[in-house]
Amino acid sequence: MRWTRNDKGLGLVNSATAEVSGVRNGRVTFTLEEGRRLVLTRGDPQLRHLDRAWASTVHAFQGRTVDNVIAAMEANHPQLTTAKAFYVEISRARDRAELVTDDAQALRERLETVTGERISALEGIGESVRTEPGLDAKASLERVTPERELADSSSPGGKTGRETPRLEAPEPGRGKRIEMDLGL
């Protein structure tokens, strides 16, 4: 079974699994993942927050590892078919991962081209922002606005006393195509 709601008092976390090890005299005994036993009586509110755990979404299993994984991936889903999603799905497996798809060749081609990495607008046009010492990237980005650039260039001498971060070429290797052998 899988818990569908946290219960701090019982030490239960949403999406954690448990095995029903006994049902007797109005009491259900669970063996939790870490080996601890939990007994709930009829009418306990946590009994309403259970679901079968025969299968799970990759998001519900984020950060967890199981012995075997069977992953289903549509070859051309516009948001979910990315190399990043593929990695997350198969990396849940300790021993074995199997992939089921509707079109192996199309999936291979898409995974080779669609990384799933989010990039900023500047990176999208091939540029990045150089951060100044002592400033994080967000603070540097907030300082580079069209209004501020205009103000900097229109003041006498083209300076306002504040340095605007300059745009520079992206880091080497960023955005390059990476060869992957997916075994498809």
Image (cartoon, rainbow, N blue to C red):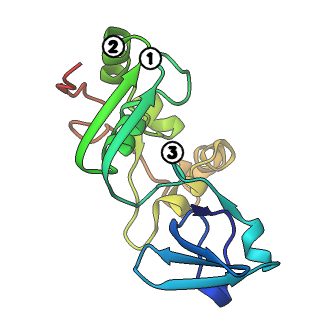
Q: Earlier in the sequence, mark 3 or mark 1?
A: 3
Q: Residue at x 17, y 25 (%)?
A: 181
Mark 3 lies on residue = 55
Q: CA distance from mark 1 to mark 2?
A: 7 Å
Q: Which mark is on residue 127?
A: none
Callout 3: few (<14), some (14-19), or many (20+) C-alpha neighbours within 10 Å?
Answer: few
Callout 2: few (<14), some (14-19), or many (20+) C-alpha neighbours within 10 Å?
Answer: some
Q: Amino acid at mark 1?
A: Ala
Looking at the rendering, which quadrant does residue 28 occupy?
Answer: bottom right
Q: Locate residue 10 relative to residue 114 in the image: left or right.
A: right
Q: Residue at x 44, y 29 (%)?
A: 72
Q: Earlier in the sequence, mark 3 or mark 2?
A: 3
Mark 2 lies on residue = 104
Query: Residue 29 in the image: x percent, y percent?
Result: 58, 79
Mark 1 lies on residue = 75
Q: Amino acid at mark 2?
A: Ala
Q: Are marks 1 and 2 in contact (CB under 8 Å)?
A: yes
